[in-house]
Amino acid sequence: MEELLHYVWKHKIHPLEPLVTTDGRRVEVLDAGLKNPHAGPDFFNAKLRIGETVWVGNVEVHSLASDWLRHGHQHDEAYNNVILHVVEQADTEVCCANGRAVPQLVLPIPQQVSARYEELLHTDRFPPCYRVVPRLHSLTIHSWLSALQVERLEQKTRAIAARLQQTGNHWEDVFFITLSRNFGFGVNGDAFEWWATHLPFRAVDKHRDNLFQVEAIFLGTAGLLEEQLDHADAYYEKLQREFNYLKHKFDLPHSTPCPPWRLLRLRPSNFPHLRLAQLASLYHREQALFSRAMEATQMDDLSALFRIAPSPYWEAHYRFATTSPRIGKQLSQNSINLIIINTVVPFLYAYGQHKGNETLCERATQFLELLKPEVNYVTRMWQAAGLQAEHAADSQALVQLQTAYCDKKECLRCRFGYEYLR
């Protein structure tokens, strides 16, 4: 319960009776201090009145006072400026490395707080704080969702930065890799990212003006031209011949992606064959895709960038040697919206930070507020609890809340959890 004791100290959830150290001195908490996420004392720059003296320094929190000794703080000079040791049980006296005795405060966790925390941790229903959600003030909801939205954008910015480092800061390549991952629409995301990371971009660029050759390289490097078909397919065989020629010309790899492509229970419109053909068409048509996406100021112009259809063969196919009704296979508007949410918006934000251009960062959040909210199990779950996403900014915030807090039982860091524990 040490984590809960941290929470009680941070939010000043104190008993009604006066706080007193184990040696009988009155304690008044003027400032609980700043939580330290790194090594060292738990709270920095606390301000306390102990007896008649006002102290400014650090605070350490443990379930048992003897944890101080068990962790070796009595030998660590980083703890010499601890002005108070907050514990549930004072089973021993403690001192700093310089020999100074550290005042100790026994701080009980209120029974109601402890009981509610146990409910949050062990309830089978999600979200665990469902009881308090309908009673939350709109300002509390809005401020927390806004913070979560920024947190999610910052998280995606870090992922983009990591990919940039791997590619020598080539923004166009990293944009395409991220776009490709999102063309997997969840199920095949890892396979698409692996494929795009290993795609020989400079070789493809030499044939970017020829859609058939781009398609051959895309499908060939993805391992989809090595399939054993039930019957002959002339287009498949033509792509194979072209890929073999290009593979020899550029010494291209042609191994099967890892992890492998998933087709089981996948809707035909999401088959990787079709998605790769769509990507090939996009890569062929938009030869400065990243720049155009960063320059788009209107949602209609941005959507138009991704309103693409693959080559004519795919009008009657979702995969090789299997015909389908002859219909257009361009991306649906819902798919385009998801691409904008998960690819364009994070890059606008990351590129804006990279360039020190606040306008791009603001445009990223504006685009999210213009798009309809995503419909998935997370948004449906929160809607059932009484929290309706109004736009994509809200749905992205709720996804961040679910993945970074609810799934990890980080209720003590959540503002909804705080309201529940109150």
Image (cartoon, grey):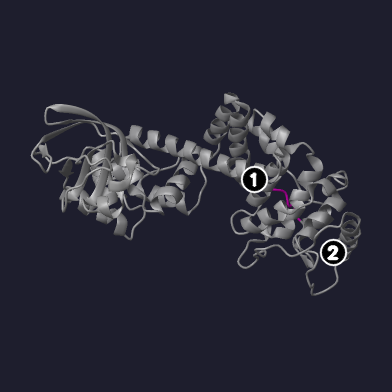
Residue at mark 2: 236
Instruction: Please tell me which of labels 1 and 2 falls first in the chain.
Output: 1
What kind of residue is marked 1? Arg
Which of the two marks, 1 or 2, is nearer to us in this view? Answer: 1
Q: Looking at the image, can residue 133 be seen? A: no
Name, please, the residue furthest toward the bottom.
230
What kind of residue is marked 2? Tyr
Q: Secondary structure at mark 2?
A: helix
Q: Main secondary structure of the magenta part?
A: loop
Give the residue at x 47% y 54%: 377
- State left or right for residue 162 relative to residue 100: right
Name, please, the residue furthest toward the front.
98
Is residue 51 one of those drawn in magenta? no
Relative image position of residue 285 (x, y in whole percent) = 80, 41
Give the residue at x 86% y 62%: 235
Q: Secondary structure at mark 1?
A: helix
Question: Can you tell which quarter of the image residue 195 is in?
Answer: bottom right
Q: Nearer the viewer, residue 118 or 143?
A: 118
Relative image position of residue 22 (x, y in whole percent) = 11, 43
Q: Nearer the viewer, residue 260 or 29?
A: 29
Q: Is residue 272 above or below residue 362?
A: below
Relative image position of residue 193 (x, y in whole percent) = 66, 53
Question: Mark 1 and mark 2: span between their CA atoms?
Answer: 33 Å
Question: Can you tell which quarter of the image residue 316 is in?
Answer: bottom right
Give the residue at x 60% y 25%: 357
Label 1 CA crowd tier, 10 Å (few <14, some 14–19, many 20+): many
Q: Which residues are magenta?
A: 327-331
Give the residue at x 55% y 28%: 362
Residue at mark 1: 163
Q: Looking at the image, can residue 16 be seen? A: yes
